[in-house]
Image: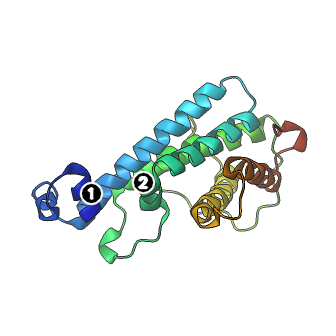
Amino acid sequence: MRAVARAVDIPPSSLYRFYPDRAALLAELRVDAYSSLIEQLTDARRTAGDRSPAGQWQAITCALRGWAVDSPDQFGLLYSIPMHTEDEWTEPVYAQRARAGSLVAGVVADAMARSQLVPPPVGNPVAALVPPWTSADGAPLDPVSIQITLGAWAALVGHLSLEPHRRAMILDPQAYYEDFVRSVMVAMGFRPNAILRP
């Protein structure tokens, strides 16, 4: 709260003139963080253009790291464990998460449709998501593409969460991350010949 107030140059107590409580403020900040992330991911996919789904995935994952490095507070807001019960996410936050998830899982579904990704055997499928994750044309995404996306995204977020603590160990964090992305892609089921190499 103090950091937010400092950023806008007002006393912390003044924040509650605009929000009824801490939870409402955090919800608004999370919506903004997701909007920022979605913008970065969308731009990366658009820039990748006609590249294969594998190339789009790599562009999106690089955009994720760029956003995490440039916006560590927003990254932490979305991907750290809430410390207070009032930090429970709200419907608008879940709606933004569905937008981000749909964007990323849509690339995975496209890769599956083009046979660039052969899904590994799926054990326990994901539950129905609310709101549902849908493709760009509004069709519901299949549970397999969502499950693959959730696992891969968790690996990437975990890597990025630990990266600041490994600065002394890693000579080139970007190259190290890109190698990790390629390893994750193999685990996801991307065909090796679809994965772009430096």
- For mark 1, give the secondary structure: helix
Residue displayed at 67% across by 52% down: 173
On screen, 133 above or below 165? Answer: above
Q: What residue sits right under mark 2 in the picture?
A: 74
Looking at the rendered structure, the number of numbered marks drawn on it comes to 2
> Measured from the top left, where is residue 106 in percent x and y?
63, 40
Residue displayed at 66% across by 52% down: 149
Q: Residue furthest top?
A: 50
> Measured from the top left, where is residue 111 in percent x and y?
75, 39
Kind of residue sitting beneath label 1: Val
Q: What residue sits right under mark 1 in the picture?
A: 4
> Measured from the top left, where is residue 148 in percent x and y?
70, 55
On screen, 112 above or below 9? Answer: above
Image quarter where the N terminus lies is bottom left
The tag earlier along the polypeptide, 1 or 2, is: 1
Residue displayed at 51% across by 38% down: 40
Marks 1 and 2 sit apart, C-alpha to C-alpha, by: 11 Å
Left or right for 142, reference 1: right
Query: Which image quarter: residue 26?
Result: bottom left
Residue displayed at 15% across by 55% down: 10
Q: Residues within 10 Å of mark 1 (few under 14, many from 20)?
A: some
Q: Is residue 1 visible?
A: no
Image quarter where the C terminus lies is top right
Q: Residues within 10 Å of mark 2 (few under 14, many from 20)?
A: many
Q: Is residue 5 visible?
A: yes
Kind of residue sitting beneath label 2: Gln
Left or right for 41, reference 78: right
Q: Nearer the viewer, residue 2 or 56?
A: 2
